[in-house]
Amino acid sequence: MRIKVVNPNTTASMTAKIGECARAVSGPGVTVDAVNPPSGPVSIESHYDEVMCAPGVVQEVLTGEVEGYDGYVIACFGDPGLLAAREVASGPVVGIAEAAMRTAGYLGRSFSVVTTLERTIGHTRELTTSYGVAGQCAGVHACEIPVVELETDPLARATVLAACESALQQDGSDVLVLGCAGMADLAAHVSGQLGVPVVDGVVAATLQVEALVRMGLRTSTRGEFATPPIKDRIGV
Amino acid sequence: MRIKVVNPNTTASMTAKIGECARAVSGPGVTVDAVNPPSGPVSIESHYDEVMCAPGVVQEVLTGEVEGYDGYVIACFGDPGLLAAREVASGPVVGIAEAAMRTAGYLGRSFSVVTTLERTIGHTRELTTSYGVAGQCAGVHACEIPVVELETDPLARATVLAACESALQQDGSDVLVLGCAGMADLAAHVSGQLGVPVVDGVVAATLQVEALVRMGLRTSTRGEFATPPIKDRIGV
Amino acid sequence: MRIKVVNPNTTASMTAKIGECARAVSGPGVTVDAVNPPSGPVSIESHYDEVMCAPGVVQEVLTGEVEGYDGYVIACFGDPGLLAAREVASGPVVGIAEAAMRTAGYLGRSFSVVTTLERTIGHTRELTTSYGVAGQCAGVHACEIPVVELETDPLARATVLAACESALQQDGSDVLVLGCAGMADLAAHVSGQLGVPVVDGVVAATLQVEALVRMGLRTSTRGEFATPPIKDRIGV
Amino acid sequence: MRIKVVNPNTTASMTAKIGECARAVSGPGVTVDAVNPPSGPVSIESHYDEVMCAPGVVQEVLTGEVEGYDGYVIACFGDPGLLAAREVASGPVVGIAEAAMRTAGYLGRSFSVVTTLERTIGHTRELTTSYGVAGQCAGVHACEIPVVELETDPLARATVLAACESALQQDGSDVLVLGCAGMADLAAHVSGQLGVPVVDGVVAATLQVEALVRMGLRTSTRGEFATPPIKDRIGV
Amino acid sequence: MRIKVVNPNTTASMTAKIGECARAVSGPGVTVDAVNPPSGPVSIESHYDEVMCAPGVVQEVLTGEVEGYDGYVIACFGDPGLLAAREVASGPVVGIAEAAMRTAGYLGRSFSVVTTLERTIGHTRELTTSYGVAGQCAGVHACEIPVVELETDPLARATVLAACESALQQDGSDVLVLGCAGMADLAAHVSGQLGVPVVDGVVAATLQVEALVRMGLRTSTRGEFATPPIKDRIGV
Amino acid sequence: MRIKVVNPNTTASMTAKIGECARAVSGPGVTVDAVNPPSGPVSIESHYDEVMCAPGVVQEVLTGEVEGYDGYVIACFGDPGLLAAREVASGPVVGIAEAAMRTAGYLGRSFSVVTTLERTIGHTRELTTSYGVAGQCAGVHACEIPVVELETDPLARATVLAACESALQQDGSDVLVLGCAGMADLAAHVSGQLGVPVVDGVVAATLQVEALVRMGLRTSTRGEFATPPIKDRIGV
């Protein structure tokens, strides 16, 4: 089984880290390749970034179809391009936000999300409604570290941990969800320090794709997610 | 006052029609210009189309800022790129789906949407949740005419009318909402035939932008919709 | 076009102020007349007041039909008598609470309401549910100034501003909504001080009526809002 | 214990019937008096009727306070004036719609309402939301008999029964709720014919008031429902 | 009329207290018997306890059918076994949580629950959703006194009162609901001290059963709550 | 890794089939053991059955802790005893209803459930609310085959298929969910015939437990799901 993990931003070091995290949990016989689009924003921190990165994500999935992948992960917590990717992929496509937040549902009554910048909280809240987890999401909190500085800021690890601790106390929640693919390597550390389950969406989504492929399940082609109608696309 | 109406698809004849409809209702002293991006899909009928057209929509708004527009309409019933456009515009931005559905709220208890293809119903329903009108939306119905054929199919007018009549009966609703910018010229006809208010989003959104500008209101820059952070965008 | 703005309370000085605010934004060729019922409570601050003022509001609309008005505004944040007025008016009727709160939806993710007395918060919250904006309303806050003292209390302006600032901080919202027609003249001041959009329902509702009339739209007569059945009304 | 049952309309024969039904279930030592306002609409079938009858309802409660009643029932399925009555009564006040629909919650998963005219369905649905029973209300159905004809139409009994049977089949519900005080005498008949529990709000509300008084419970005076502020009421 | 009040735990002193409270409010001609299962947990403070006590509750109702009871109260705030009891009883069955929370709806806009241990809050919140009162429940608060210590801890009365006062202030609610059958004797004291209505579910449920029996209403047998199919039960 | 699959009913042949289905998808190195309690109902088709089987389910998990299992599946679509099992297990516990319905969320906009008897639909709907999937569940349909006859009725396969086809057409949904562990072997057949993804909860839950264990995740012990307090349990 071959899974393609698409990092929607163009920061190669983050793509590498995401690939490592995904491979660390995937089962025997599963190949995980992590890629990012050749062009686009270096991080996704606004609606503008979401719009600009989504065509690249979908293109990576279209390419993946030629390459023969069995399923796809979209590795950005805004799940950009997810529904479009489902229309064009022949295997399952899972976003890390949906995977992380649904996984949290198996582990307790409620979860808190800790994400990067405060300006992304509105979009995350909208996703909780789309995915049906709004009632389980006790809070969304920003640590105010920009995505790319998660890798460079020497205090990032401590700042994320502090934001997680504060979120737990403020929300009285059972579970933490890390709200950025760039935090994928922090889950074990935070869980060890705070004594609660901490869900990273990269590994949750990768295992979810693996499970769907094993069950022979893919996106329904019955209506909304059927292959899009062929049409002229001027100038594209 | 100058309002820029952006048709997210690249069908120029539809752009022209949208402009005419908007100008027919705008007040004295208001200039309305209708445009479409130079490249992109000729119609928006899938999540894939939404993703592919959105960068062009945002680019038109960015250009509009240089051109000195006071506000913007996004003239496709999926409201593609709306939130991103709000981040980059200095004046208000209104989508035709939100304007049509909120306008319907002033006219009765419930409304029915009649749109083009069935595959777009899911996205419309998601918008009703985002805009808080899910409880007022009694149904979303497809007439199964592709967007571009609204202008070429000689039976389009009759087919849309029949779908509207059927929607009213099935839903027991008070108001009709036309679910495609390409239907903007049909509102008066359908209303005359069926005896209920029929809301077209193109005119509703244009008048909403005019009203917001007159009140001196624009998108809040306090958090989520502040100007996006400047960053490297590889290959863009 | 002639719009009748009905102030549901009997305080003439407030009626005058409301009329000025409405006229300041209405378009060329639009006549705005502000009136109040000849009898009833001097302010609306309880369910009892709502019940006692509503017949007067509806009577003003019935009179307006004879006078030939094209549309109506109900200028009290509880929107008293709104649905009944829609049954008897031949043009559109818009309440200032619904107009203000729906307008806020075009300007950000969430809004906070600042109103007069704490005892009215429950009614406002119920309206947010009726209008579908409960998910966007981040909070309702009282400044504890009775309605009639908004005009006489020399500290009113400062107290409302302080309540607005506190609401923004507490709720983390994007937009402010002024929860009383008697605050109609404070919107620009508060917006200037706090740097966020501030929506006053009087102007929002007036422009909404103007837009509906221009679009040829009025309340549906298909069911719930058809003219009420003629019947004996003993002793009335 | 003395309970005052207020019929909001001015049809004395209906008031008499309501009184009989309430007295048939009230406990030993409980006096039930049924009254109606001296003026107002003969039946409540529109938002206009609701507005016009509500001051009379509240006045009956104010009079009741002087007369020394322990609690009040508002005996019209729209619960007109309920919240205002709670502000001015020193004992509990219960509407028949809220009592009927909450009572149904003890008897099954879901209930169907059968009411008089279709135009009142919207208001009933809004009440289901206010009372928290929207998720349990499987449908609201009209038998299209005007309120006053419930007493005069020789086919009324059969028509209501047929509407109830149809509602059960269409909704797959467990329980029926009669949506008009004028149907209070039909509950046993319909239940006997259809084999499901049938809740009439008049008796449910009367017993609820009796229970609240026995428990020493009345409306909270802590905030929203405190006695309304004393104020000038011009011309009243 | 004979009502059987089933205390789901096996603490006889609590059963006695519950019986006294219920008898204190029940009407003339009503016999109230309070019992508890012969085996099971001494208090219900976890999902595990809920599961272990429920068969005993249902067995008490089955026995009650032979004994000829007209209706049943389940006197634990988690309402364990309620739906199963409805399937096997020929009279109505009411849980104290549903009765208390629905009763609160007649007394104000919102209520706060004060319960025993924090770990039970999640279950209580789930009940508010099931019963349709989630929108009215302003908060659920724990006083951190284990159930059995309500009777032995000399500070219990003061601790519960303090938790109630804090809940009111924090939630801004109108009404208090006591979240444990073991607090049934504290309602009057708390209400007297804090000046708000305080609802105890034991008396509310007993009076609700009495009212249902008087109205001739019992659980619908139309579908979900019909007598369960007879089947082999291995080893039972 | 060792996973214990608990069939809550006492029908050994069903337990065997469940075990086979689970083993067919589990990964290399995963041992799956399927068991059922020694006593209890032979099938779960009522609230009464749910109550009677739950102690046996929890006991199997307690035993599993001694036996050293890493995680548990509860293999009945009502998920009986799930929350209690989470309190006592040191590894993750997943119910087949939650796993099936959350899995469906990755495959389309909406799903339909096809279950056994109509009387269980209410419980299933309540689970959709608890799990946050009510908005995605387009319908719950009964094929009216009792659980134990799924194995003996020669027409069962055809009847389930017909109910699935009818559900798809009626609901316009994208995905089917099989609402009984006894249907676990029908998923591939139904999917092949109807051309949509068909989710069986037994395999979905087994793979979910496997994924959780691989990620090192288990139920939070922070509050509600901490080990229950030790207490006297009279007569147990």
Image (cartoon, coloured by chain):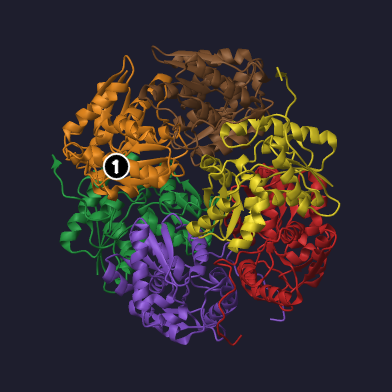
Chain colours: A green, B orange, C brown, D yellow, E red, F purple
Q: Looking at the figure, which quarter contains the C terminus of chain B? A: top left
Q: Tell me, yes or no, if residue D44 can be seen here.
A: yes
Q: Image check: D179 left or right of E115?
A: left
Secondary structure, mark 1, is helix
Q: Nearer the viewer, residue B91 or D147?
A: D147
Q: Nearer the viewer, residue B172 or A90?
A: B172
Residue A58 x, y percent position in the rendering: 23, 51
What residue is at 73 percent from the left and 72 percent from the top? Answer: E42
In the rendered image of this protein, does residue A81 appear above or below residue B86?
A: below
Q: Nearer the viewer, residue E84 or C69?
A: C69
In the rendered image of this protein, does residue C163 appear above or below residue A88?
A: above
What residue is at 28 percent from the left and 67 percent from the top? Answer: F194
Q: Image check: D10 left or right of B163?
A: right
- Residue with the mark numbered 1: B162
Q: Nearer the viewer, residue D139 or F122?
A: D139
Q: Tell me, yes or no, if residue D137 can be seen here.
A: no
Residue F87 found in image quarter: bottom right
Residue A136 x, y percent position in the rendering: 50, 55
Q: Image check: F138 left or right of E166?
A: left
User: For the residue carrying disc 1, how many other residues have a C-alpha within 10 Å: few (<14), some (14-19), or many (20+)?
Assistant: some
Q: Image check: B64 left or right of E25?
A: left
Three-letter code, disc 1: Ala
Q: Looking at the figure, which quarter contains the N terminus of chain B? A: top left
